[in-house]
Amino acid sequence: MSDSTDGGEDPRPDGAGTLAERGNGIRWEQALNDMPLPIVVADFHGGDTELIIFNDLMEEMTGLTKAEAQEMDAWEIYRTDETHDTKQTMAERVRELGEPIRDHETELLDHDGNLHQVVISSTPIFDERGDVRATMTSFRDVTELRDKEEALQATQEQVAGTLDEAVSQLEAVAERVVDNAENIQQRASEQDDSLQDVAREMESLNASMEEVAASTDELAEAADEMRSAADEGRSAAEDAQEATDELLETGESLVDTVSALESEIGEISEVVDLIADIADQTNILALNANIEAARADAEGGGFKVVADEVRNLAEESQAHAADIREQIAVVEEKATETVAETETASERIEETGDRIQESLSALEGIAERIEESTSGIEEIADANTDQATRAEEVTATVDEVADRAQLVREAAGETVEAAETQRDVVGEVSAAVTQLRDRTDQK
């Protein structure tokens, strides 16, 4: 370590620092002995060095009594690196320089074999002529302090190393958290987009089902009209049967059987085809009725009017059926799950006779099938209504899930921000650890 000295033009204040007569009545020796530091006052009067003060703390630090120290050379008392090499003590250097030396740190080996880290300060004491008469030297033992500093430095280095490892792990974890959070955010966004698409599809499906419901209502109205027309035709046929036995005798069954309609409850096309088929046969029956009316001349005039009305209603039903078929085709394109493909299978009514009784039987069969069709349409309407209700519930559920997905996406975004903030904090901690290590290395 280097010496630190405070220089000046004249370190001696007026009338101060002089060694007064030792019997002047001031008990300064007792005061120095009671100082809380090891202190030595060496008097150089007459060329010999006399230890005026060698206080108790000095004896404790060196392991020598004042008497033992008085019998030794000064450099042997204070065994430091400097005295070992130069055989000169700090007090002797101050005597030569004529100025104080303060806070010089070195190692001192006491006479018990213990090594001390000490900070030495020495100042000259001048006589009335301004010559250095004596020196006062203090020793501050900083061994314990330096040991603590070294232990603290070792602890700091250990802590820095541990923090380095922990920060590295935290940085890796923070990176993974950021990656995972970004992945969650992306997936939440994709889920939200998918749910939005599902919601739009459900809205489209609901609209299609409403159109189906409207078409079913129109079909039901047409079926009611056909049933009324069939009833009127049957009534007219009965009247004609009563009016003429010839028509009853010559009438053969126009239609032996009418093919049963086979369809599932949700298949609307089958019902439409059935109505259209019935309308065709009604047309044929009306034509046959006209033929019979023509044969009957004047007696068949009323029946011809009814037959014409039936034919007109049949044609109108055909037109309604065609319109409904077009609407169902549109519905099938929008939601194949709502309206299943319809399978149509009908057997043509075989013409077996031209008697009025056959017309009556055919009309009765038509009326029965119209009744069945009406029931089927009502069942389809009920099923469609139930399906629409469920679709609305599904739509509401999808909307709710979409809202939750939006919340998840927002939460994922906040997680990404928090993870990035955590990563920044870890970076700051890493920088602080590096700074701590640098400061530790500088000590």
Image (cartoon, rainbow, N blue to C red):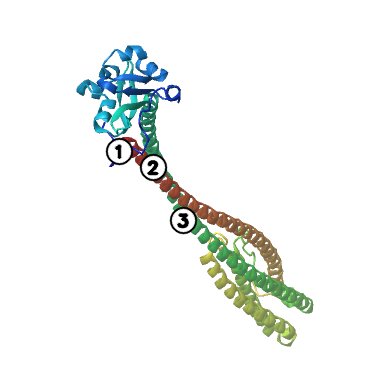
Q: Is the residue 437 above or below the residue 187 in the image? A: above
Q: Quadrant of the N terminus?
A: top left
Mark number displayed over residue 190? 3
Judge left or right: residue 121 versus residue 289: left
Residue closest to the eye, 193 or 97: 97
Mark number displayed over residue 432? 2
Gap between marks 3 and 1 measured at Cα: 77 Å
x%, y% of residue 288?
A: 64, 78
| The quadrant where residue 158 appears | top left
Callout 3 secondary element: helix
Q: Amino acid at mark 1?
A: Asp
Mark number displayed over residue 6? 1
Gap between marks 2 and 1 measured at Cα: 38 Å
- Disc 2 versus disc 3: nearer the observer: 2
x%, y% of residue 313?
A: 67, 79
- Disc 3 versus disc 1: nearer the observer: 1
Residue closest to the eye, 45 or 209: 45
Circle 1 Cα neighbour tier, 10 Å, few/some/many (<14 / 14–19 / ≥20) = few
Judge left or right: residue 17 versus residue 368: left
Residue lying farthest to the left in this orientation: 85
